[in-house]
Image (cartoon, rainbow, N blue to C red):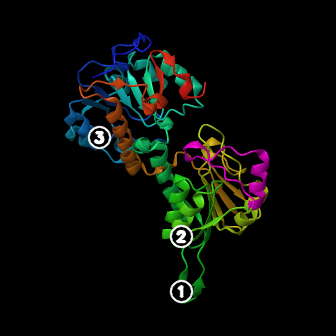
């Protein structure tokens, strides 16, 4: 038997729909109209929904509308969406104005936000902890927004974890970028002119991106070393065939959810001093250290980069959040004494096909949680996943989800 809701649970939120037994119903017992727009950011090649996802949604009874050419950059032509049962719309505003659930990779443009109807739901990567202006704009527009970058790190939410799925792609690509940019072989080469030793690759940060970079560099034949402030990462690093390095007197810096906690300035300085000699000996360095919602920790000083051998390369995957390397400039290559420091941005977009496939699967898992059996959109804020990801609802910012 269903529990009778309390008076506090049954409250008017100022959006279309009803509230049944503590669960907020945004749409009635009818099909959803789900929109997929072309991403507005100039360097974004991914698409939020693939033809495979569109086909599953249509089969389930929903209507899917896709902006013209939304998936072309990712390798999904309009015809593939039509074959999946979706309808192609000519403009972004047409999709935004008619859909009651819009799927995005990144943030919607101002034009799109001005086109959505009050009560529309949105699922996107919103940089919710830092971009307060975007979150306030979504609330003002009456949008119920789900931040894909706020998926809690619990077992049942793993299939929705966009940060992990996209970080894995970035880690893989970073190793390829390092191998392509380096003036030396990655693997050991035995030639008629003699034996050439393998490149020495150092990877800083052994989270999802770092572990994928390690695995890829090892497959390419490099001699791989890795560092992380979390003691538990050592076993994972060594299981991939790399060597784990850490100061003998280091403290474990693992925080709740498996992320690294923020370090004190004294801890950061000791780490930089420890890493300096390893950086100088490396042919390629890949940095992946990041703390959600905060500036990336500084791990390598410019003076250390200048001591590396000319022809060496550094790939800083944390460039978008300030960089792990003092010399990093986001979106640019910086050359210091013959050492190239690369600050790539939006690395998953460089592999848009599989980045889109995995992102769409993350969305599919989210939809399985928030779409009811009657095909309507249902929000149960007693569910910790829904509660954590929903940042705006009913014209208000749900401040507890983003630390306000």
Marker disc for residue 53: 3
Q: Residue 232: name its quadrant.
A: bottom right
- For disc 2, the neighbor class at 10 Å (few under 14, some 14 to 19, many from 20) is some
Look at the image and give the residue range highlighted in magenta. Answer: 249-274
Above or below 145: residue 188: below
Residue 107 percent location from the top left of the image? 48, 31
The number of numbered discs placed on residues in the rendered structure image is 3
Q: Earlier in the sequence, mark 1 or mark 3?
A: 3
The secondary element bearing badge 1 is classed as: strand
Considering the image in quadrants, where does the N terminus appear? top left
Which residue: 78% across, 58% down?
273
Q: Earlier in the sequence, mark 3 or mark 2?
A: 3
Q: Are marks 1 and 2 in contact (CB under 8 Å)?
A: no
Can residue 169 be seen here?
yes
Residue at mark 1: 191
Q: Nearer the viewer, mark 1 or mark 2?
A: 2
Considering the image in quadrants, where does the C terminus appear? top right
Is 119 left, or right, of 242 in this rendering? Answer: left
Residue 31 percent location from the top left of the image? 24, 25
- For disc 1, the neighbor class at 10 Å (few under 14, some 14 to 19, many from 20) is few
Residue at mark 2: 241
The secondary element bearing badge 2 is classed as: loop
């Amino acid at each position: 038997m269903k529990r009778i809701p309390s008076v506090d649970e049954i409250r008017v939120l100022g959006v279309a729909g009803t509230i049944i037994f503590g669960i907020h119903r945004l749409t009635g017992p009818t099909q959803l109209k789900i929109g997929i727009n072309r991403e507005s950011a100039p360097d974004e090649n991914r698409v939020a929904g693939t033809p495979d996802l569109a086909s599953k949604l249509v089969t389930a009874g929903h209507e899917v509308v896709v902006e013209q050419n939304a998936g072309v950059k990712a390798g999904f032509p309009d015809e593939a969406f039509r074959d999946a049962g979706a309808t192609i719309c000519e403009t972004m505003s047409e999709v935004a104005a008619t859909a009651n659930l819009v799927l995005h990779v990144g943030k919607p443009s101002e034009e799109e936000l001005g086109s959505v109807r009050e009560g529309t739901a949105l699922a996107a990567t919103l940089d919710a902890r830092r971009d307060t202006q975007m979150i306030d704009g979504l609330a003002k527009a009456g949008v119920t927004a789900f931040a894909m970058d706020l998926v809690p790190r619990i077992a049942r939410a793993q299939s929705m974890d966009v940060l992990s799925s996209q970080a894995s792609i970035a880690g893989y690509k970073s190793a390829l970028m390092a191998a392509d940019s380096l003036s030396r072989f990655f693997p050991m080469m035995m030639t008629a002119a003699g034996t050439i030793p393998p490149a020495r690759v150092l990877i800083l940060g052994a989270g999802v991106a770092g572990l994928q970079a390690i695995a890829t560099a090892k497959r390419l034949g490099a001699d791989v070393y890795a560092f992380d402030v979390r003691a538990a990462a050592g076993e994972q690093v060594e299981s991939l065939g790399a060597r784990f390095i850490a100061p003998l007197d280091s403290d474990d810096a693992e925080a709740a959810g498996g992320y690294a906690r923020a370090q004190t300035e004294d801890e950061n300085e000791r780490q930089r001093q420890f890493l300096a000699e390893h950086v100088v000996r490396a042919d390629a360095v890949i940095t992946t250290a990041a703390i959600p919602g905060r500036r990336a920790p500084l791990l390598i000083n410019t003076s250390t980069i200048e001591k590396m051998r000319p022809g060496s390369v550094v790939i800083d995957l944390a460039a978008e959040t300030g960089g792990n390397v003092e010399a990093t400039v986001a979106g640019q290559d910086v050359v210091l004494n013959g050492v190239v420091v690369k600050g790539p941005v939006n690395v998953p977009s460089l592999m848009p096909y599989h980045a889109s496939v995995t992102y769409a699967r993350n969305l599919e898992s989210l939809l399985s949680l928030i779409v009811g059996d009657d095909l309507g959109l249902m929000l149960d804020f007693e569910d910790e996943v829904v509660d954590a990801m929903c940042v705006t609802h009913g014209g208000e910012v749900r401040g507890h989800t983003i630390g306000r």
